[in-house]
Image: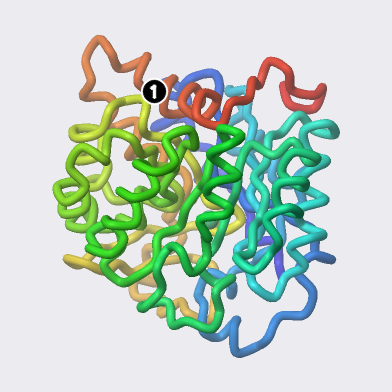
Amino acid sequence: MPDCFAYDQKDALFYDQNIRDRLPKKLVDAHCHVNLPSHVGPLDPADIAGDWALQCGVELPAERAKSILRTLFPDARTNCLALPLPLEQANMAANNSYLAELFTRLGEPALMAVKPQWSPEQVEHDLLAGRFNGFKPYLSFARSIAPAQLRISDYLPETQLAIANRHSKVVLLHLPRPERLADDDNIRDLRMIVERYPDLRLVLAHLGRSFNVDFLREGLVKLGDAASRLYFDTAAVLNPEVYALAFEKLRPDQILFGTDMPFMLWHGRRRWTERTYINLCREDFPWNRHLEPELETDYTLFIYEQVKVILDVTGQAGTDRDRLRTAVFSGNAEKVYRFSTERSGPDASR
Ligand SMILES: [Zn+2]
């Protein structure tokens, strides 16, 4: 798989004009998939063909992730919360071992992959031995059930919730089902988790997969009071309407910046319909339909588009603006995942 990241002069200019002066001096990417090529192994071509994200490359060693963050944000001290690869065919035990070393080796916190069929005793042992900050279950680990029919308990059994709760850890959850955060079964399951397991912290990836604003609006209404007990990361969300609503309806401490690297490392823009979106992209991936080829050389990085949107929306916060940005770009991740970048290894700062 190719390394998709290519930084050019236009990106540097975009950073200078839109980001440099507004970004806090510390940044934590709270959603970064890290792994070695040896964890991935040969992929089934059918899986690659059916998943646009896989077609863009799935390998990202931790050192490469850190160097990319330094290139993207040269004026900030950067760290990443390392997540396992969300890929059923990958060697998740090896990926977990690699992640467990990261704090000692590079000063980076990490989440542990959990498969639903793993024994609770082993999971609890590995969580503590690896000093992980929490679990990253993933719906593709429940392969026998169609994604549209999945319930959260199919890939995140209550035994694992109980372990996370017992040790006050985080569960970072990618929601199933086409209606995402607005799905009634997901709402029921999320309510159950926050009520029955009050000592774990539940983070919903991609703002509950709310890439379109309707999912977030409907989901927050249906969640009611339970919404105040959830956290949300911003991985791969670029939609200004989603951010405007999130910052209006959620507390400032509930929103954690994340990129979803190695996905989203390329140049492009996103266009939305009511409940779907399309990625317009410069790089020549199999799914790319090149709808506006004459504009592609002007595209900057998706991650820069995302950061600009967050800076624009938080810019409306008046006197609280700087505090809000510091919280979203680093403080919330440190509090929710309970790590300190001050204790990071020598390579963590610049
Ligand atoms: Zn992800």
According to the image, label 1 marks what residue? Answer: 325
- The amino acid type of the residue labelled 1 equals Arg
When asked about the image quadrant of residue 322, the answer is top left
Pinpoint residue 295: horizontal percent, then vertical percent.
37, 63
Q: In terms of depth relative to the viewer, which is nearer, 128 or 307?
A: 128
Q: In terms of depth relative to the viewer, which is nearer, 299 or 101?
A: 101
- Give the quadrant of the N terminus: bottom right
Residue for point 34% across, 60% down = 270
Side (left or right) of 298 relative to 69: left
Q: 203 above or below 142?
A: above
Pinpoint residue 133: horizontal percent, then vertical percent.
64, 36
Residue for point 34% across, 50% down = 192
Side (left or right) of 210 relative to 279: left
When asked about the image quadrant of residue 163, the answer is top right
Disc 1 CB within 8 Å of nearest ligand 1 atom: no
Residue for point 66% across, 34% down = 70
Q: Can residue 264 be seen in this view?
A: no
When asked about the image quadrant of residue 47, the answer is bottom right
